[in-house]
Amino acid sequence: MLNLVHAAFTLTLLASLLSGQAVEAVNFNMLLSSAAKAVRFTSITTETKSSNPPSLGELRRKYSETFKFSGPRVKQIALTFDDVPDPRFTPQVLDILKIHGIKATFFVVGHRVEKHPDLLKRIYREGHQIGNHSYSHPLFKNKSVNEFQREILQTERIIYQTIGIKPRYIRPPYGEINEAQLKWAKKEGYRIINWNVDSLDWKGLNKDKVKQNILKSVGPGSIVLQHAGGGHGSDLTGTIKALPEIILSLKKRGYQFVTVPELLQAGKPSK
Ligand SMILES: [Zn+2]
């Protein structure tokens, strides 16, 4: 049994890595709990041969037009900022983007828009793309499709009341989503946007670490995950300090910064 436990844990980790599984704000406890689930599943499936729920990697392949982790391999990069609006960090990120003439994509949390509607108005007014990051930032993986719909539609309503648009792009908190939710999103014409470059900035990393995490793995068509908002005690100073240097370094390498829809549209004939 010990071997099985170990194997399942290793497999879970490996599968996460191989599938490019999005790990936002993951912690060791979460990994342990998913390993424990995998063990339970393995124990059951050895007897019943019932199938595991598909991994994020499998869902990405099965729903490749809806579920995106990156764009086509063009010399463009989409910077994305989650958990906004937050008056502590979002204005500073917006100031930097404005100085450098860059448009990014911001994934907004409904309950934060209720508190800071003017900040969402500013993001939108300055030409950035707006995406839906749920109302209360839950882990959707184990929730029902109804709960997913409620969170997405509630936030959509709040965004619409504030700036008059309905975002077509959803980023599920922690990058986690299940197949039923993905099917609904596809049917309704949404796109689910994860990332293939993770700054891990939510950990409160310093400027150099944030910069290193991004620059070491960024490439043509990358979608980069950063934050411009956070919970109590979160410190995004590293992100804010690193941002100008990341922008200059990537511009020097010949990259152009675009929003997520622009990146996904790259290489396709314009409508
Ligand atoms: Zn988030």
Image: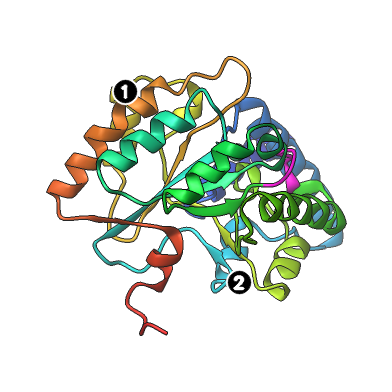
The answer to whether any part of residue 74 appears in the image is yes
Q: Which sits in the foreground, 169 or 179?
A: 169
Could you tell me which residue is drawn at 66 percent across and 49 percent down?
A: 162
How far across and down, in percent of the image, does residue 55 sit? 64, 57
Q: Which residues are magenta?
A: 134-140
Q: Quadrant of the N terminus?
A: top right
Q: Residues within 10 Å of mark 2 (few under 14, many from 20)?
A: some
Residue 136 counted in the magenta span? yes
The answer to whether any part of residue 42 appears in the image is no
User: Residue tagged by mark 2?
Assistant: 63
How far across and down, in percent of the image, does residue 169 sit? 58, 60
How far across and down, in percent of the image, does residue 148 sit? 79, 54
Q: Secondary structure at mark 2?
A: loop
Could you tell me which residue is drawn at 36 percent across and 69 percent down?
A: 72
Viewed as shown, does residue 53 lie left or right of 3? right
Viewed as shown, does residue 183 lie left or right of 168? right
From what the image shows, is residue 52 above or below residue 80? below
The kind of residue on which mark 1 rests is Lys
